[in-house]
Image (cartoon, rainbow, N blue to C red):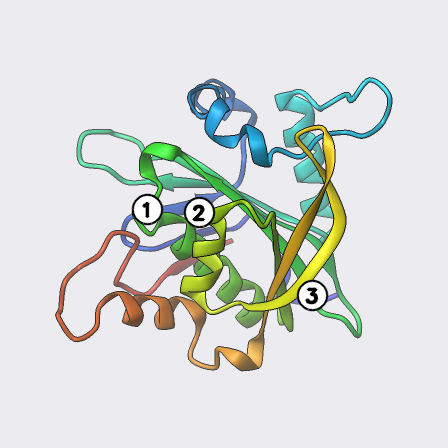
Amino acid sequence: MSGQFAWPVTLKTDTLILRPVRLRDRKEWSAVRERNAEWLAPWEASNPAPGGYLPSYPEMVRSLRKQARAATGLPFLITERTGHLRDPAIVGQLTVSTIVWGSAMTATLGYWVDRDRAGQGIAPTAVALVTDYCFDRLGLHRMEINIRPENAASLRVVEKLGFRDEGLRKSYLHIAGEWADHRSFALTQDEVPGGLLARWQAQRQPGRGIRQPGGDTPPSIHS
């Protein structure tokens, strides 16, 4: 295991704060999820076991914390600073899971974003910020994202960030009640020597000096 692993950790740009999931976030998190139920339903992981039991919010938080303590996962809420709210609002969730150390040094990343904030650069900025943290601070070598071929919004995220399409995985995950094919995308550390976030921000601002949502200042990290 990398000696750099620490939890909890908070990652920031000028407008986004990625922080640990807390039990006291239940009310706000549930409201966002309920508002986005139809938007997220086709991509939701399901349980193929008889009865299809899914964890409650407290069980989810405890499970994510257990993964973080075991250094096999990094669970974040994506929150956004806005002018009219005192506290950053929850606009999504991002989890780095199945972290494998040793000779692999790899992980898998998944995320969702509030439909009302989709298309504003939040998902690619969050993915880039966390990928840089995993590469630069944890020393991981490879980040993987698996997406259903029908999920156009998520496919645009990996396309914008330059993740390589590594092909189709048949019946890869149980999603919305059935085994679903996924396309697998990946990046290795040596493919983004200057950092993924910096490359993404430069891509969004092609010499015009226009400030874009999601951050044009260096990210900060708080362990």
Place of residue 120 in the rendered image (x, y in percent of width and height, measured from the top left): 29, 47
Disc 2 marks which residue? 153
Place of residue 60 in the rendered image (x, y in percent of width and height, measured from the top left): 66, 29
What element does badge 3 sit on? strand
Amino acid at circle 2: Ala
Query: Between marks 2 and 3, how big is the CA–CA gap?
Result: 24 Å
| Badge 1 or badge 2: first in the primary sequence | 1
Amino acid at circle 3: Thr
| Badge 2 or badge 3: first in the primary sequence | 3
Residue 119: assigned label: 1
Horizontally, is 174 left or right of 35 in the view? right
Viewer-nearest residue: 25 or 194 = 194
Most extreme residue toward the right, as rendered? 50
Q: Residues within 10 Å of mark 2 (few under 14, many from 20)?
A: few
Q: Are marks 2 and 3 in contact (CB under 8 Å)?
A: no
Query: Between marks 1 and 3, how big is the CA–CA gap?
Result: 28 Å
Give the residue displayed 52% in from the left and 45% down from the top.
151
Residue 183: assigned label: none
What element does badge 2 sit on? helix
What element does badge 1 sit on? loop
Q: Are marks 1 and 3 in contact (CB under 8 Å)?
A: no
Disc 3 marks which residue? 106
